[in-house]
Image (cartoon, coloured by chain):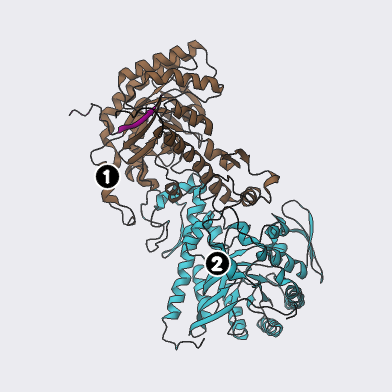
Chain colours: A cyan, B brown
Amino acid sequence: MPRYNQQVSLTLQIHRKAGPARRATLTLPHGVVETPVFMPVGTQGTVKAVPQQLLEELDVRILLGNTYHLYLRPGHEAIRRMGGLHRFMSWERPILTDSGGFQVFSLSELRKVSDEGVAFRSHIDGSPHFFSPEHSMDVQIALGSDIAMAFDECTEYPADRTRARKSLEMTLAWAQRSKRHFEAHQHEVPWQLEERSAFSAQRSEDELRERIEGQTPNLFGIVQGGMFADLRRESAERLVEMDFPGYAIGGLSVGEPRELTREMIATTLPLLPEDKPRYVMGVGYPDEIAEYARMGVDMMDCVLPTRAARHGLLFTSEGRLNIKNRQYAEDQGPADPACACLVCRRYSRAYLRHLMAAQEPLAAVLNTVHNLAFYLETMRKVREEVAGSQWPAASS
Amino acid sequence: MPRYNQQVSLTLQIHRKAGPARRATLTLPHGVVETPVFMPVGTQGTVKAVPQQLLEELDVRILLGNTYHLYLRPGHEAIRRMGGLHRFMSWERPILTDSGGFQVFSLSELRKVSDEGVAFRSHIDGSPHFFSPEHSMDVQIALGSDIAMAFDECTEYPADRTRARKSLEMTLAWAQRSKRHFEAHQHEVPWQLEERSAFSAQRSEDELRERIEGQTPNLFGIVQGGMFADLRRESAERLVEMDFPGYAIGGLSVGEPRELTREMIATTLPLLPEDKPRYVMGVGYPDEIAEYARMGVDMMDCVLPTRAARHGLLFTSEGRLNIKNRQYAEDQGPADPACACLVCRRYSRAYLRHLMAAQEPLAAVLNTVHNLAFYLETMRKVREEVAGSQWPAASS
C-alpha cells in the first residue's frame, strides 16, 4: 500500500437512529467514544485546573488539544520526542487536535494571510511564525492526536458573500493540501516511539501498545461558507468529494444569532455522509449541544463550561448560577440538586462561593469539574433518549 | 460538672519511645492521628489548589485552619451557622486552628497592641477589628476545630531580652485568659448543630455524630520567650502550671538561624509533660521536621510545602528541584524517582515544567500534591524508624 493513500483508523458503529439523531460508538486508536459526545477543551495539554485522574472519574472519553498553543509551547517537536501528546500529558484516551487556524486568526498578532498560509507573531513572545496546511499537518502528526483537523480559515462574522466565498475557496484549497500532506506523513505518528516508562506501573501500557499498533491519526475536513446556506452546501459537497473519514462544520458560534447557527447546521448535515462522524466546532450552551445532537451531530467541543467555571458561572438543571452571588453565602445545598458529580455530592454552594470570594485556586478545580459533569450528563441523556427511542433500530 | 472546668477530648497513646522521640496515636473528636505528624495548612478552609478528595488519598489526617482568615472571610458566625469548619469545607477529619495572633501581627494593617488585645485593620478591606484572647476563643469555638490555640504574641526576631520578657508576660497573661474563657464556652461548639444534609449520601454521618457526641475542642498553650533559653524555660514552666491538654512551641522559624531554632526546641521540650502532645508551630524544611520529630516533637505545620509548590519548588529524595528550570524541558522521569505519590506515578518532570511555563492552574494542584506527599512520607518514615527502634517499648 503506497504511503500517500489515506489510512483510516476509526470506525463509527451506529446503534440506533431517532430521526436525524444517532447513537453510535466511535472507535479510535486510543479508545472508544460513545456519541453524541461533548469534548472538553485541554488547550495547553491540560483541561485547565483539572487533574487527569478527575477527568477519568468524570468518564471523559476524548479531549481536544489546541495545535497553536502546543506548537508554541512546549513545541510539537519536543512533544514528538517525548512520544506524543497522549504520553506527554498522561492521557491514554483519544485526543482531537484542531488545526491551529482558529487561534492563529484570533490570538496571534500581525498576521498576514496568503494563499500559501498565514504568517503571524506569537501572542507569547512576539516571535515570527508561519502556518501552512502542510505545517499544520506536520504539527498535528507530531502531537499524535487520534483526530487531526484540516487547516482552515474560520470566516469571521459578519462577512459578506464575496468575503465568505473567497474564504471558502481558500479553505477548500487548504483542505486538499492538508489531505495530500497528511496522507504522505500520517504514519510518522510518534506512538510507535513509545516505550515502557520506568514510572508507569499503574498503566496498562502493553494493552495500549497493542491497540495503537499500525494505527494512524485520522484527518477530518471542515465545512465553511459563512452564513450563506448555498455556500455551506457547496463547501460540504466539494469537501465530501475529497473523501475524509469525518467532517466538521466550522465557522459557527462566532457571534451570529443562534437561529443562524442552527440553520447552517441543518443545511449542512444532510450533505455529510451518514456513516461518518459529524463534528460541530466550538458550540455551545447545554441546551444547544443537546439540540444539535438531536439534529444528528456526533461531536462537539467548547471552552464555555471550563471558561465559565473559572468565572464562577455554573450550569445546572435549574439554569445558570453565578456562584459569586451573595445569596449563596450560607446556602448549604449543592450547586445542582439534580447532579451526582463529585462536587455536588460533597460541597455546598456556600463553600464554592467562599472559594471564589477568597480567590482560592480550588474554586477553578471544583467549578470546572461540576460544569464538565453537567455537560457530559447532558450528552449522556441525549444518548439514552436516542437509544430508547421508538424509531426502528439502525442497521449498523 | 461545672461548665468552667476544662473538658479534655483527646488522648495520646504512646506506642514506643526512641530516646526523646515517640511514636503515638493522638485521638481527637474527629478522628485518629498517627504521630509524629505533619499538618498541611488550609488557610482559608482549603489547602490551596488541592481537592479534599486528594488530601484523603494522601492520607492527610489533620489539617490546620487559620482563624484570622476565616474570621474575616466568610466569618466565624457564618461558619458556626453552617455547622462548623469541618462541615463547611467537607473535611471530617481533625482540624487544628491557630489563634489568629500570628496573622494579626504579620498581615493586618495599623495594628495597636494593648494588654487587652490587638486592634487592627483587615488586609482585605481595611475594616477595623479587635482580637482579644476571649474573642480568639469565641472564634475558634465557632469554627469548631478539634484543637484550638491560646491567643499569643509571636515575638519577632530579633528581639532583645527586655522585649522578649515583656512579650512573654503578655502571652502568659493571655494564655490564662484564653483558658478561662475557653473552659466557660468550649461546649458551645457547633458540632451539635449538625444535621444530616440532603446531599451527603456518601458520608457516614451517623458514625461521625456518635464520635463527636459530648466531645469538645481542646485548647493548647503556647510557649514563647524569644531566643532566650531561660525565658523559654520560664514560659514553659508557668504554662505547664496552668495545665493545658497539649503544648505548642511558638515564635520559631521567624528568621533566626537554624541552630537557634533547634536549641530553643531542645531547651523547651524536656519541660513539657511527656504524656501530652507537643507541637512546634511553623516549621520547616523536610530535614528539619524529621530532626524535630526525632527530638520528641509530635506535631508540626508549615506553609512551606504548599507555598513552595505554587512557585515550582519541589521537595524530593534527591533534594530540592526547581521544576521551572529549562533542564527539565524534556525530562521524562518523575519529579522524585523514589516517590510513589499520585503525581510521581503519572506525570513527568517535563509535563510539570510545561504547566509552570504555561502558567496553568494544574501546576499548583500537582506540585502541591507531590510536596505534601513528600512531607507526609518523611514523617511516616520517622514513625517507622521510632516504632522499629531498639529502645524498649514505652509503657503507654
Is B238 or B25 nearer to us in this picture? B25
Instruction: Check the image and report above or below for B323 versus B232.
Output: below
As helix, strand or loop, the secondary structure at mark 2 comes to: helix
The magenta stretch is B1-19
Within 10 Å of disc 1 (Cα), the crowding (few <14, some 14-19, many 20+) is few
> Residue B239 at x, y = what percent?
35, 19
**Where is mark 1, residue-wise?**
B193
- Whether residue B283 is visible: no
Quarter of the rendering occupied by the N terminus of chain A: bottom right
State the separation of the CA atoms marked 2 and 1.
52 Å
**Amino acid tagged 1:** Leu
**Where is mark 2, residue-wise?**
A207
As helix, strand or loop, the secondary structure at mark 1 comes to: helix
Chain bearing tag 2 is: A
Whether residue B122 sits left or right of residue B181 in the image: it is right
| Most distant residue in the top direction | B162
Residue drawn at the location 55% of the way across and 54% of the way down: B346
Instruction: Check the image and report above or below for A33 versus B39.
Output: below
Is A179 or A269 nearer to us in this picture? A179
**Amino acid tagged 2:** Glu
> Residue B288 at x, y = what percent?
51, 29
Residue A214 occupies quadrant: bottom right
Which numbered dot is residue B269?
none
| Most distant residue in the front direction | B390
Chain bearing tag 1 is: B
> Residue A281 at x, y = what percent?
61, 71
Whether residue A220 sits left or right of residue A131 in the image: it is left
Task: Check if residue A200 falls in the magenta segment.
Answer: no
Within 10 Å of disc 2 (Cα), the crowding (few <14, some 14-19, many 20+) is few
Task: Check if residue B9 falls in the magenta segment.
Answer: yes
Residue drawn at the location 82% of the way across and 69% of the way down: A114
- Whether residue B5 is visible: yes
